[in-house]
Image: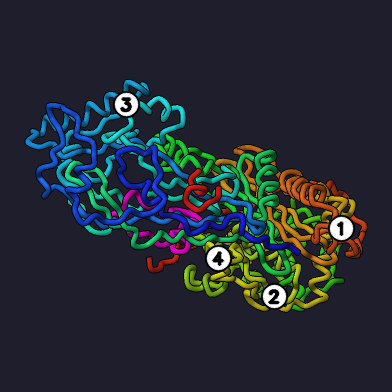
Amino acid sequence: MFFLFSLKSLRPCRAVCCFIVACLPLASQAQVVLKAQPVLDDPKEAVSKLPPPPKEDLKASWQTQKEARALTLSVPAPRGQIVDRHGIPFAQNRAANYLALVMPYLEGASDAQIVAFAKTTIDNVNKALGKTWALADEKLLLHYKHRRWLPLVFSVEEGLNVEVSPDMEEKLQPLLGSNLVLQPSYMRHYPQGTTACHIIGYTGKTRPLPTGPIVDGDPVFEEMEGREGIETAFDSDLKGVPGIVNVLFSPDGKRLSEDVRRVPSPGRNVVLSIDYNFQKYAENALRKHTTSGAMVIMDVTNGDILAMASNPGFDLNEFVPGIRQKRYEELTKDPRLPLYPRAFRGEYPPASTFKIVTALAALDSGKVTAKTYYDCTTALDVGNRVFHNWNKVGEGSMTVVTAIKRSCNTWFYRAALDSGADYLSNMALRLGFGERTGIPLKAEGAGFVQTNAWSQQNLGQKTQSGDLANMAIGQGRVLVTPLQACQSMAALGDGTRIPQPRLVLQVQDIADRVVMAYEPKDRKRIDLNPDHRQTVINGMVAVVNSGGGTGRSAGIKHAEIAGKTGTAQWKIAKDQNLAWFTGFLPAGKPMFAFAVVYEGEPGETVSGGQKAAPIVREVFNNIFEKAPADDPMLLAMKDVPKAKVVEEEVTGSSGAEKIEPARPAPPPPQKKGIGGFFRKLFGRD
């Protein structure tokens, strides 16, 4: 259905010596050395060819040869790229220049004179650029004593290196020389900005640069490591292997020669299952229709996660090279939680979307058949409590198909009570609820499903009828992530197995060779009864395509959608509710499973059909209408027959699902556990 394009346009070549040389503290950055210079037998011979030092009160001395140094330094490798399934980049690298001070050997200078020398250079820069950059006296002296052979970056604000722009560099040209240099470094770049931000993640400094005496293997510039998302999950693949260079310095800090012992080996490229366009359509729709929410789209045939969007998001480039403390506090204190990956970490009551589980469980128990009728009354007494339907008007007798279509609460209370708690919880676990899907992102939500075993252990009794009725409509002690909800729809769409959700397709080296492939595989067999499955699908088709269906606003002309709406009490104290829409398409031959959750504002009236279903319609309209005519997806769906829409007479229907008041349940117990850059560097952009 989808094709992986070659990443040859992204492949670096092996010519990296020029970058290694550029990273070293040259007297001038104007000249690029393309190959390593040989180590000189007699440094004095080289010295005789150099221009005499300037006549100043404090001048570099060539007489104390013990101040010369031969150093073995590490050159960090550029991180690999993160790309979508078609090679569209989400994470790349580029070069950044920072201003750095190179300290010569100042014979006989006092601490005050050393500091004055350094600050004079920095002050000249500040005058030229209108900046207020400064370094503490202690840091200047420590660097002079231990590391003056290496450049000291001082274009720093709030603890973060500040990149020198081309305009700034032009203003600094008269000042650049032996004591002031542009220090190049790798900088992570996220060309898509906010797109897939919770999936991609970001990087941070592995550790601060050393400040003590130079030891073999010290890095030329700061190394980066993954902090969130794929950046951290595949850090060992992305970071590459650093290079090694031997460098000979004169007493005053000038580089005499360098010998590249090992060229940096760039990190590997990680190819995601995400389709950039699908992801963009989902994020755009969420921004348009929600304040907060999430959407997941999966390929039913192989488990590929094609989109996994959370709204709101954030711009990954704000974390490059690091994020300002004030901005980070704004993000962490934002009540909308932009850093929170709702799509795979958020755990929500599934509301009426869980009625699909209840229907399958009831049919599986044998206590309910496709022809079993229950009255869809306005309320039902369960024990000493009254459980209500969303519709204030009774709708008469109906079968499971119409109960799904109309989302009748009282029908599902009866079905669950007749079937028993074990059938309901077992079907939920069978469809993948209550455990993580296994995607390679940390802190994925596990969700929760109340079972008789859990009730016995934690409540001292089996699941009671009130809890069972609550759970039957997706309230009470049941929580799911949008990813789990989508996975369950993929399982139902297939009918025999749950495909393992796949977020990463492969890892490639710089020559496009696949070094690790993640083949599609089954997570587990479920082997749903074909008749039961088709009965439930008939109800889901009616939800979208039949008069009185609660999800008609999700319908599109390009394919027949089978879906289920849901509306849940969520944050009761804040009067904040959820709207859901889950399902798959085409109904006759499922290819795409989806799940959408809409977080309502406090006091906002929401329903799955009004708030979540239109998001599905917009996203899939974009997918179909913006795909080329010869797209394999469109061709595969061309001749899919439409499912039979079952129509039954009902009375008093309004087509708008409302919230069923439900007893708030305590959260499940916490589980304990063991706790130009690329063109220069690789001959490409």
Query: In the rendered structure, which segment of residues is drawn in magenta?
Result: 218-244
Any mark on residue 40, and which? none
Disc 3 + disc 1, Cβ < 8 Å:
no
Q: Around disc 1, counting alpha carbons within 10 Å, would you say few (fewer than 14), some (14 to 19), or many (20 or more)? A: some
* Earlier sequence position, callout 4 versus callout 3: 3
Q: Magenta includes 225? A: yes
Q: Position of residue 36 (x, y in %)?
A: 35, 54
- The residue under label 3 is 125
Q: Which residue is mark 1?
A: 396
Question: How many marks are shown on the rendered structure?
Answer: 4
* Amino acid, disc 4: Val
Q: Is residue 639 left or right of residue 407?
A: right
Q: Is residue 533 left or right of residue 574?
A: right
Check if mark 1's residue and mark 4's residue have beta carbons within 8 Å. Answer: no
> Residue 497: which numbered mark, if any?
2
Identify the secondary structure beneath mark 3.
Answer: helix
Q: Is residue 57 above or below residue 31?
A: above
Q: CA distance from mark 4 to mark 3?
A: 44 Å
Residue 461 picture location, percent across and down: 52, 72
Label at residue 507? 4
- Quadrant containing the N terminus is bottom right
The answer to whether the residue labelled 2 contacts the one labelled 4, judged by CB atoms less than 8 Å apart, is no
Distance (Cα) linking label 3 and label 1: 83 Å
Name the amino acid type tagged 1: Gly
Q: Amino acid at mark 3?
A: Val
- Are circles 2 and 1 on residues that touch, CB within 8 Å? no
Are the residues tagged 4 and 3 within 8 Å (C-beta)? no
Residue 384 visible in the picture: no
> Foreground: 133 or 325?
133
| Residue at point 40%, 60% (across, down) | 263
* Most foreground residue, 53 or 326: 53
